[in-house]
Amino acid sequence: MSKKRDEIIKEVEREIEYYADKTRRQYRAHIGDYLEFVGQGDWQDRDTVYRYIEKLRKRGVSQAHINYMVRGPIGCLFRAHGLRAPVKLPRLARLNVRNPVGAAFELDGVIDLIKAARESGNLQWQVIMVLSTIWGLRAGEIIQLTKQDISKKARTIKILTLKGGVPAEHVVPEQVYPYLAKYDFPPLSESQLRRIFAGVNQAAGLQRVRRKAFHAIRHRLVTELGLQDLGELTINSFMRWHTGGTIGSYFGPEAARNDMKVYPKHPFLKYWG
């Protein structure tokens, strides 16, 4: 790496100095991917940023995740040098109970995935499907998790949410705690995670549909929760969505109580216990 590139990284490190450890790792990874794409070119060039966005789209990255990357890590690279990212991003509707967007798995399909993971005896398959079906985690959130994010004392799981990088914490129900407690959370890339999901999909006997994976399970979860007469505030709390534009706290006594309201009516939890 050239001295010039070293100076670029040094400015970024100053910008993210007070971010949480996981957020710093996430930003470094995304910024590194962008700079690798740029190579010896001009990382500040507007057309270069758009070409990188097009590369992400061809890889199947959702527009929501692209928006996060450009406004977050890549935007941080520009901000560290007193600049603004020279691109305009489309505005997306917020996913919510009344308006779930995007492709969703059928209910029976998600149940088949859970059964395939359980019957396989493969702990990695089981943990990944627990994370996806119980809390609706995105692929990027799954690969960020480490063993330290599972608290055996408090029986909680801490998740670095992709949108904003704000840690969210959940009570872990007893039906799925044994899976998480035994797993070591080895490092995984998103491509490795996609291959693992393809294996579970095949074992479940489902026809694989391109770009229909973890987000499709998340959408089904939101849809099913909306049918459980839980109330929108309870569901918003469980999904750790911002409500009314106020950031607030992502975890506290009220959020924990909301978790415990949801679990008895959770559409997938009973298939794990």
Image (spheres, helix red, strand yellow):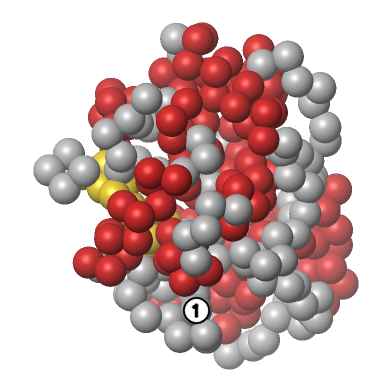
- Residue 233 visible, this angle: yes
Residue 248's quadrant in the figure?
bottom left
Q: Number of labelled discs?
A: 1
Tag 1: amino acid: Thr
Q: Residue at x 66, y 12 (%)?
A: 203
Is residue 43 left or right of 79 when viewed as pictured? Answer: right
Horizontal side of 136 relative to 214 (left or right) equals: left
Query: Could you tell me which residue is drawn at 60 percent across and 53 percent down?
Result: 227
Q: Residue drawn 82% across and 32% down?
A: 209
Closest to the observer, 268 or 59: 268
The residue lying at 63 percent from left, 22 percent from top is 112
Residue toward you, 90 or 119 = 119
Closer-to-camera residue (54/155): 155
Secondary structure under tag 1 reads loop
Asked if residue 207 is positioned above or below residue 90 in the image, the reply reads above
* In the displayed structure image, the side of residue 266 where residue 139 appears, left or right: right
